[in-house]
Image (cartoon, helix red, strand yellow):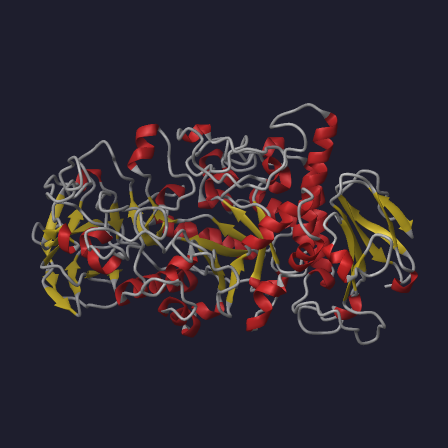
Amino acid sequence: MPDSPDPVVRPGRAFPQGVFADAQGTNFSLWSGGAERVELCLFDDDGRETRIEVPDRTAHQWHCHVEGVGPGQRYGYRVHGPYDPARGLRFNASKLLLDPYAAAIDGTVDWDGPTLLPYVPGEGDDADLTPEETDSAPAMPKSVVADRSYDWEGDEPPQHRWEQTVIYEAHVRGLTMRHPGVPEELRGTYAGLASPAVLDHLTGLGVTAVELLPVHHFIDESFLAERGLTNYWGYSSIGFFAPHGPYAAAGSRGDQVREFKDMVKALHRAGLEVILDVVYNHTAEGNHLGPMLAFKGIDNLAYYRQTEDPRFFMDYTGTGNSLDPTHPQVLRLIMDSLRYFAQECHVDGFRFDLAAALARGLHEADRLSGFLDTIHQDPVLSQVKLIAEPWDVGPGGYQVGNFPVLWSEWNGEYRDDLRDFWRGELPLATFAERFAGSADLYADDGRRPGASINFITAHDGFTLRDLVSYNDKHNEANLEDNQDGADDNRSWNCGAEGQTDDPEVLALRARQQRNLLATLVLSQGVPMILGGDEGGRTQGGSNNAWCQDNESSWHDWDGLDAGLVDFTRRVVALRRDEPVFRRRDFLTGDEQPGSDLPDVLWLRPDGPALSDGDWEHEGARALAVFLNGRGARRTDDGDHAHAGTFLVAFNAHHEGVEFTIDPELGEGWTVELASDDDAQEGAEVRSMILPGRSLRVLRRRQD
């Protein structure tokens, strides 16, 4: 707060948006196309408020410069205008609003304090029509003037190519809360994630990128607070420039920005890229009956999509509202946020939650939408890793395979098909398509296998261990009578639901986890491992742990399955060391230079190539794939290098199957990796009995 009771206020500058401190004070700029007046509200450490009339407006930017204000200052806005929900206008100056461009946010919502609802609650359809005039400031978090300077000490992003990339999806709190090697005061924080103990585990696994669940500042919904739960996953953003304050050990008056950057720098030094899961499709303000926190009170008609009746919100997200990226200010906000994290925070890429909602034009998802076009031409954002979750909950929202060049996609087809294959319910042809990189989805528009982000499990759904341990979801802890979460999980409990001491069931579950992990990592495309799957993490059968910020969601480091961790390390190392498992281009079946064999052959267990009839055989559950090293001889820097030749045998049948290797494929085949306990790794084989539900990787010794 300025020392003077009457701070010196000057017109300042309209751009850039947000707040920027200088030697004399701080410039404030807020966009609102429909406001009649705007007040800047400054708060001291005791919560006392000083209101300043924002004196100037340029191109709908309300702006001023306040002398004596610097980093650490808490602030907000009150925006004056008509409250007329029937016309989509919801201005209410009684409600303190966060700055959409704030680089830091201090505090959390107090749902027991003054109401954040902009209307007087009532019964029936007219509940939101009467404005509520209680001052919400005591219950609101505050925007913070952040010091955006930082010494990156020559930080250089790893810049792994897509074919080199192995993604590890993680949660800042969940990954670190129970790690014995992380100091207790750092657990659950950016600093904890950057600790040597965590970095050693990640680099030991061989992953190349960490994809973090949302770290934009978010809030807990009121109904969760009433149930004693929290929004653990964080898909409830309210600050698109602010790292989530409670994830910082150092403090929340701008310190979280520095700690976040420290984390990125530490991960880069370890050779790990940072990908952020970003939620630009909706905000924490909910539908027309939700709270007023920022956008709804700044300019509701501009920020959100409305139905034909402007009183109500269009909802493509299942959360009550949808941001409107067809509006120039909303599109600019999203792009500025992305550039901020890419340029000022050195983030390497973004995974866009419900990206189909962003790609919608006036209604339908459109690969030529303004959002996609703007990213495509941006000199910064077109060069980072871009990953779409290619669906939303609206009509026509499932868009797997339909995003344009430059984009990779979470391949939901891969997830579903690989789950089906290993429970014995998928045609061989579909399995081969997915293992080979899903050319049917991505090859026709110039994309490469790197467009397919392959995954078996993710934060939303069962963990890998639970996928092979439960037929049904068990979400009772969410207090929704187990009605939430997906019902179609394509899971299989291997003979017993949940916990068991049956040794045969446990052995089958262990083998199935190895089968799924090995298939995932060795498939063409980009593998994404759900954090904790490498160690057998369980959520007790929950497939929707979004509100469980407790030990049921956190990684159990003391209970790691050491054998599974070691297996994961070995299969990731095999992918890293052998180009045949991470080709830059799709397999063709064409004969390779220097070899009389093609780059790939799909084989029957008895040796010959699969015929049309074999592909169509409904009962076939076993096959092998020959991967010719002669077709993958380029190293990552473009030079020629020797590449190994491999044969991977898959048996998704419940009984053992005999595999025979055709002599025309070469001699001297040895077992490189196996999911079953019967294999003798390193042993030479010409034929073998592959036990039920198992796989083996064979290397040709002559290479």
Relative horizontal placement of residue 222, taking residue 566 as reference (left or right): left
| The quarter of the displayed image where residue 678 is located | top right
Residue found at the very far left of the displayed protein = 6
Quadrant in the picture for the C terminus: bottom right
At 11% across and 41% down in the image, what residue appears?
132
| The quarter of the displayed image where residue 576 is located | bottom right
Work out whether 100 lies above or below 117: below
| The quarter of the displayed image where residue 632 is located | bottom right
Relative horizontal placement of residue 641, taking residue 168 as reference (left or right): right
Residue found at the very far bottom of the displayed protein = 593
Is residue 528 visible in the rendered structure shown here? no
Q: Position of residue 513 (x, y in %)?
A: 67, 40
Q: Position of residue 342 (x, y in %)?
A: 43, 62
Front residue of this view, candidates 633 and 250: 633
Work out whether 353 lies above or below 548: below
Is residue 554 visible in the rendered structure shown here? yes
Question: Tag count in the figure?
Answer: 0
Front residue of this view, candidates 673 and 345: 673
